[in-house]
Image (spheres, rainbow, N blue to C red):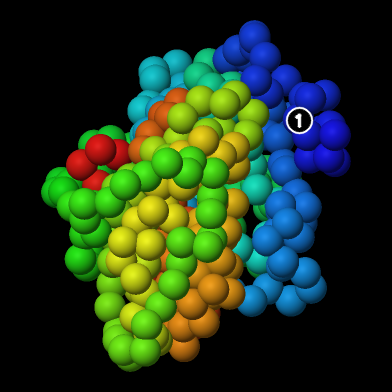
Amino acid sequence: MTTTEALLDASILGKKTEYDSHYDPSKLFPIARKAKREEIGVKGALPFHGFDRWNHYEISWLNEKGKPVVAIGEIVFDCDSENIIESKSMKLYFNSFNNTVFKNVATVEAIVQKDFEQRLKGSFVTIRITPLHDIEPQILASQLEGTCIDSLDIECSDYHANKSFLTTDEEWVEETLHSDLLKSNCLVTNQPDWCSVKITYKGRRINHEGLLRYIVSFRNDNEFHEQCIEKIFMQILQQCQPEELTVLGRSTRRGGLDINSCRSTKPMQWQSVPNVRLCRQ
């Protein structure tokens, strides 16, 4: 049993849980990135830049008169953080706000900021909590930008991540490809995680059919969402050796949360990547 598996086994995650409706920061469960990164050859200085962005659609607390406030939260932190937060623990954490009185939105944001910074241990954490009546109208996107490769007529039989599908030819290109066929399973609950992935690169042309087979091959793997995106980034980088590479994943909602991770060879600001919801988010 790995260190990560031992920690998860000893935690409340993946088990029947009593929900605490009063603020309880101990519900947040950090998981170290280190072990999973070492599995894909990431040791020492990170070979990528990027961030993780969580959208939470089920945040509520009581104002000073006991009236409920409902809001949506955006939580963004750098990929250099020592830890991630397990998603069920984040749901339990925010559920503990439900019967807790807070003065205003700024108070809630400050508390969440402090709790996440203590557990993530990274260079920055940005929290935005917006009551529903303050949210601007949004248009859902039907798909990610770029060329969709999902219509390619391929045969698939390998459903565990297989980097040997990643090949290139000599043509030098700069292109953006995307797929909605990425699926893996939660490392804790074994529940399916669905994701759309966008790959932007400059270098020798990646074989599109092989790339699609590669994406499909994650189907029965057990990984956290962030780890899938990092594995895709690292294996494309290692197998195809592009000059530039950016991988963006937008997952579907589970437990009121969606997770959106971005990794790139180029330094980037998270504000430069719009938080545009896809239709299935």
Left or right: where 74 falls relative to 29 = left
Element carrying mark 1: helix
Neighbours of disc 1 within 10 Å: few (<14), some (14-19), many (20+): some
State whether residue 196 is above or below residue 2. Answer: below
Q: Give the residue type that dot 1 points to.
A: Leu
Locate the C terminus by quadrant.
top left
- Residue drawn where x is 44% and y is 55% of the image: 214
Left or right: where 158 falls relative to 147 = right
Compare residues 80 and 225 and report the one nearer the observer.
225
- Residue drawn where x is 65% and y is 48% of the image: 84
Find residue 44 and report its image quarter.
Answer: bottom right
Compare residues 100 and 184 and report the one nearer the observer.
184
x and y percent of residue 144 in the render?
Answer: 24, 58
Compare residues 166 and 62 and report the one nearer the observer.
166
x and y percent of residue 194 in the render?
Answer: 39, 38
- Residue drawn where x is 20% and y is 42% of the image: 279
- Residue drawn where x is 68% and y is 73% of the image: 46
Left or right: where 217 falls relative to 4 = left
Q: Is residue 233 visible?
A: no
Locate the N terminus by quadrant.
top right
Compare residues 168 and 65 and report the one nearer the observer.
168
Residue receiving disc 1? 8
x and y percent of residue 104 in the render?
Answer: 46, 37
Find residue 100 and report its image quarter.
Answer: top right
Find residue 37 and report its image quarter.
Answer: bottom right
x and y percent of residue 71 in the render?
Answer: 37, 34
